[in-house]
Amino acid sequence: MNDDVRDLYQEVILDHNKNPRNFGTMDDAEVRREGYNPLCGDHYTFFLKTDHGTVTDLRFEGTGCAISKASASMMSAEVKGKSKAEVERLFQLFHDIVTGKIDALDHLDELGKLAAFGGVSEFPARVKCATLAWHTLREALADAAARNDAATSTETQG
């Protein structure tokens, strides 16, 4: 891990772990989805609202290690206002960085502070911790799309 990524890690990930953003439940969520990592016990519930495929709100609650909590916190702040396609692009970049396929410093413009997770690739056992929230969000977005497709189908048939 180079010094820039290490400094970002210290500053951003530790802050989001101590003070997670968008932490809490959402009574009127469109989709509720649980994410669980049986290897380390990270367990979160995500609450999602969308509008025509765009994330309008995302909250989460649960417990886990510093990496998983910071990842969920930063993801929840980053994806609001993004379309499903934009979230998918961000997921792919994030996944490629934490698995060491690409260098975080080459994608700072797109990732912003999420680049702090570039150091995770040095600890393969932590990759699942970092990506738990992202995989769960993808499932929640698929659920939301299926619900919206079913509602649209019912409206056109009725």
Image (cartoon, grey):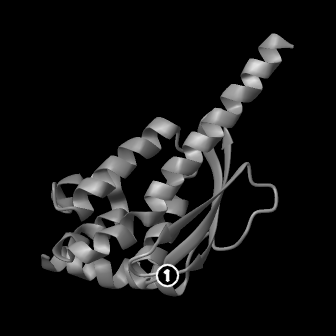
Residue 127: percent from left, percent from top: 30, 69
**Residue type at tag 1:** Gly
Image point (53%, 49%), residue name: 139
Q: Which image quarter holds the C terminus?
A: top right
Give the answer, above or below, for where 46 lies relative to 83.
Answer: below
Question: Taking the image as drawn, is residue 81 in sight?
Answer: no
Residue 34: percent from left, percent from top: 59, 63
Image point (15%, 80%), residue name: 3
Q: Which residue is mark 1?
A: 64
Q: Give the quarter of the image for residue 77.
A: bottom right
Residue 41: percent from left, percent from top: 47, 81
Give the number of callouts: 1
Label 1: element kind? loop
Q: Residue furthest right?
A: 158
Question: Taking the image as drawn, is residue 54 in sight?
Answer: yes
Give the answer, above or below, for where 151 lies relative to 57.
Answer: above
Q: Residue furthest front?
A: 38
Residue 59: percent from left, percent from top: 64, 64
Q: Which image quarter holds the N terminus?
A: bottom left
Q: Residue furthest top?
A: 157
Image point (69%, 36%), residue name: 147
Q: Give the quarter of the image for residue 63.
A: bottom right
Left or right, 124 with reference to 34? left
Image point (61%, 43%), residue name: 143
Q: Nearer the viewer, residue 32 or 106?
A: 32
Left or right, 26 with reference to 43? right
Q: Give the quarter of the image for residue 66.
A: bottom left
Label 1 packing within 10 angstroms: few (<14), some (14-19), many (20+)? some
